[in-house]
Amino acid sequence: MKKTIFLLLLILVCVHGLNAQQIRVSGVVTSVDEGNISLPGVTVMVQGTARGTVTDIEGRYEIDVLPADTLIFSFVGLVTQRVAVAGRSNIDVGLRADVAQLGEFVVTGYGTESRRLISGSLGVVGEDAIRESTLRTIDGVLQGRSAGVQITQSSGTPGAANAIRIRGSSSITAGNQPLVVVDGIPVTSGHYGQVGFSGQRIDALSDINPNDIESITVLKDASAAAIYGARATNGVILITTRRGREQRTRLRFQSTYGVQDLENRLEMLNAEQWHELKGTTPPDPAQMVDNDWLSQVLRTAPQANYELSVNGGDANTQFFVSGNYYKQEGILLGTSFERLSSRVNLDHTVNENLDIGLNAGVSYSLNHRV
């Protein structure tokens, strides 16, 4: 009998000790993107267990946990957040919208729309795809990244113009280049007039630094004509440049360096083989000189890119400032492309009824051709 009583007392002491270790945590869950309004129906779980609760209509919750537990806050369309209890009894959490779950937003001629709601045919090249590309021209970044967009290189000269065709050619005698719109403003595309020879045309789009671009949207069907008129006959390429965000100021520097060379070079005849081909009598073998003429005009060409950007702002003012220097030597001696560019994008909210902004881009390029 004494043993039974002792065992019961021991069990009660252990249970009391376990209960004493638990603490009750309470708090409020709000939506950061909607002015910190309370969120009802948010699931609050203790990580690694099946214990949990749900916030009430005012976004409040209460749950018993151990001091070393971690709470998981989750809701449809919002980013799941994990918070360590660390002995606290009050934990308030703000959840942000999960952009990937809400659907991708793309830029159209009328503004921004959810991609799920657009019936027209379009292609989007996002910021990540642009960063992955080692090419430093817009047409080079677009190549192979949007269905129905064909880019043909007419010359190997650095900075030379490429022919862009969206769903083929629509005219025999008129131009077939698409309309290019940067931040809502149509710009000159294709080659500059009267400065192209031997197929080495200068491309106006080469003056824009791809790393200043946030997204590229290609409008492919006839619906684009309803926005831009006859200029959109050959399709439209909408370019949206990067803008400032409400965050701490971030300074970013990027530098890349690479080389280019021919994959295959023609095998040339030596002097003796050349005379044999021509059917002529070679001179004294001691006087014959072999010369690899290709090595006299071709080289292993370096290319370098240096970028510096500043991005940040507060609730009222956001800014993005960048500077870029890019130089590409051509494989053919005497050819090169050099670009010095800068961009300033500024947004300022004066009051709830007035927003002002500045989009400015300056570029200087030098193209050497033979």
Image: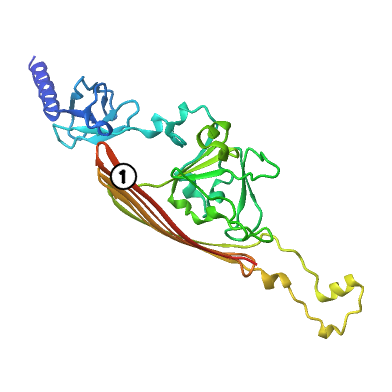
Q: Position of residue 199 (x, y in %)?
A: 67, 58
Quick one: 311 or 349, which is closer to the camera?
349
Q: Is residue 285 left or right of residue 85?
A: right
Asked if residue 109 is positioned above or below residue 249 in the image, the reply reads: above
Q: Is residue 109 left or right of residue 121?
A: left
Q: Quadrant of residue 321?
A: bottom left
Residue at the (89%, 72%) spot, across then down: 278
Name the quadrant of the C terminus.
Answer: bottom right
Q: Quadrant of residue 289?
A: bottom right
Residue bearing the label numbered 1: 356
Helix, strand or loop for disc 1? strand
- Residue 132 at least partly seen: yes
Quick one: 329 or 160, which is closer to the camera?
160
Kind of residue sitting beneath label 1: Ile
Quick one: 75 or 111, which is closer to the camera?
111
Identify the coloring.
Answer: rainbow
Residue at the (77%, 77%) spot, across then down: 290
How crowded pointer 1 is (Cα within 10 Å; few <14, some 14-19, many 20+) is rated as: few
Q: Position of residue 161 (x, y in %)?
A: 60, 54
Q: Is residue 223 left or right of residue 66?
A: right
Residue at the (66%, 68%) spot, across then down: 298
Q: Position of residue 117 (x, y in %)?
A: 46, 26
